[in-house]
Amino acid sequence: MAAPRHGRRASMTYLVPTDMATSFTPGEVSDFRANFSQFDKNGDGTIDVAELAHVLSQLGETVGRDKINSMIAEVDMDGSHTVDFGEFCHVMKNIRDGNHEAAFHAVAQKAAKVFHLQGAGGAQHSFSEEEKIAFTEHVNKCLGDDPVMGPRLPLDPNSMDLFAGCGDGLLLCKLINMAVPDTVDERALNKRDNMNVYQKTENNNLAINAAKAIGCKVVNVGPSDLIEGRPILILGLIWQIIKIQLLSQISLTMHPELVRLLNDGETLEDLMKLPPEQVLLRWFNFHLAAAGHPSRVTNFGADIKDAEAYSVLLHQLNPNVCDYAAEPVVAARAAHVLENAEKLGVPHFIKATDITSGNKKLNLGFVAQLFNTCPGLTITEEELGEYDFAGLELDDAGDTREERVFRMWINSLGDDTIYVNNLFSDVSDGVVILKVMDKVQPGIVNWRKVNMAPRNKFKKVENCNYCVVLGKKLNFSLVGIGGVDIVNQNKMLILAIIWQLMRRHTLNILTKLGGGHAVEEPAVVNWANGKVQASGKSSSIRNFHDHSLSSGRYLIELCGGVEPRAVNWEYVSEGASEEDALNNGKYAISIARRIGACVFLTPEDIYEVKPKMIMMFVASLWITAIKLAQ
């Protein structure tokens, strides 16, 4: 039954089984092939675990590897551990016939509902029409008062304005700054009307690299994709930015009253480890329980599509303003819920049909907006005093900025099965570290030795001991580090391992681009000094501890050496004061990203001369310089 495995995607690759040849019309078969191609990313005629994980990610689903294997096994008729086109046809027939209990059926059905746009050469680009409308309305609300974007808005939600509006990079950069303020230094943006391709490319480079720096997973997306207005890529990026914006306030730092959500026996640290989505579900259920409602929600789709839970939640948040939505028809009930939300001042972009269809992205966004507007949690100062918030702060070895940089770097590596929310807890079973090691040094991990879903401490220690073995094979400095230290979330030791992985990954890229000649830190320093001096500047550094780096000016000069057009020297000072130095550092980071460098440090890292972060900044610029020269 398996389809032929060709290296390219073509309709002849996807053959309908003989026993089903009369079951479908030619039009249906054509649609099935288009839908299947959305899964079959490498065009080999099958859907494997990685490809299903990728589609699930695009559909807003977070699913573990074991569950994905189980989903494939449910419909894998020939025991190949993949789904071929014949098996996919059986899935679609079952859906049509109303027999679709398997989890894979639900994924296929949802993917089939996305909007299909015929592109150049017959390529299929797919996106959700309702998400396009929702995100367009969100952009209009958020950026309508912006002095640069305001005159360009509003965009028409029912048109393709959103995709055309992203072409010059300004919209995305502005949206990123709404999500994480000051990520993009607007002095580095081209803002004129009717930009040329070079200026649009610079802005989109800045948008892509800034998005990575705030935690977006941006894989196989380049400036030309954004300039061309490719819908699925733009919507995927915009959703990630909006999600970060909406979830950024859901933390104990911003809302210490979240301690009310602790379960018996849990600590503050346990709550901090939860992803914001899980915190929102707890918050939702906390209010349902307080209202005496018997049901609980476990997801942002099926559990809330009847709008009943929303009705109870809103009434619990403000019973004086929000009455119960008691309409017998679900569509009317959902519309009533949104009317109540508007009474609370919630700036939502969801439609009643998005609730009733169970759109997980838009419902997640709506619940986050409800929380951000009206959390409905109260706690006294005396009650807060019972919790040790000071004990949550990382020690000096576990600098919070360094943890964040490493977390963002891991998330930028392009593995759909990895997303790190809390570095120390998320790597403690060894699986993420092993996946990163395999990215840094492909083939180094023997996956038969790995416990992919370790359920006890013994299995986790086995994985983490294997991490240490491979780290030594990579010549990492791991003196005194054992697998149990990773399992026990020793912050200093975990940071040391991840730093060495990040460093090795960057130097490996330099070695590859440089024709195979090994590169180490002294060579990076020498390259930087040579580049600065070749541009007509006299500055130099001895190493990445050099105090002169604190002013930020040397790094701006280095950016100018890589791309002279990138720097507007009117914005550059000597960096004599702390304020001027931080402004220089902020400008240097955005210039580097605009050139095309993927950098993760902060202006404070430059001002405080953090050698690790500055070394990675310079090495990333060298990588960019080589690519520009090629």
Image (cartoon, rainbow, N blue to C red):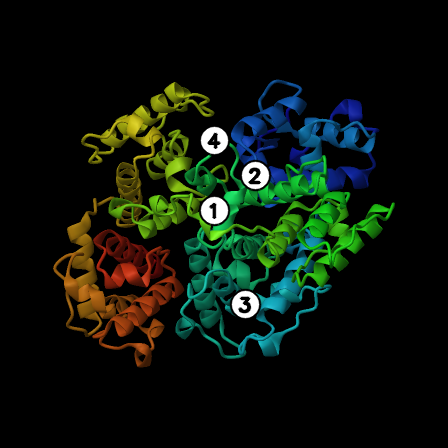
Q: Residue at x 72, y 47 (%)?
A: 310
Where's residue 218, x and y in %? 48, 51
Q: Which residue is mark 1?
A: 383
C-alpha gap between disc 1 and disc 3: 44 Å
Of the image marks 2 and 4, the number of the one nearer the N terminus:
2
Q: Amino acid at mark 4?
A: Gly
C-alpha gap between disc 2 and disc 4: 27 Å
Residue 171's mark? 3
Residue 1 visible in image: no
Q: Amino acid at mark 1?
A: Glu
In the image, taking residue 339 as reference, residue 274 lies left or right, namely left
Q: Amino acid at mark 2?
A: Thr
Of the image marks 2 and 1, the number of the one nearer the N terminus:
2
Q: Which residue is mark 2?
A: 62
Residue 265's mark? 4
Q: Are marks 1 and 4 in contact (CB under 8 Å)?
A: no
Q: Nearer the viewer, mark 1 or mark 4?
A: 1
Classify mark 4: helix, strand or loop: loop
Judging depth in this view, the residue of 589 and 366 nearest the camera is: 366
C-alpha gap between disc 2 and disc 3: 27 Å
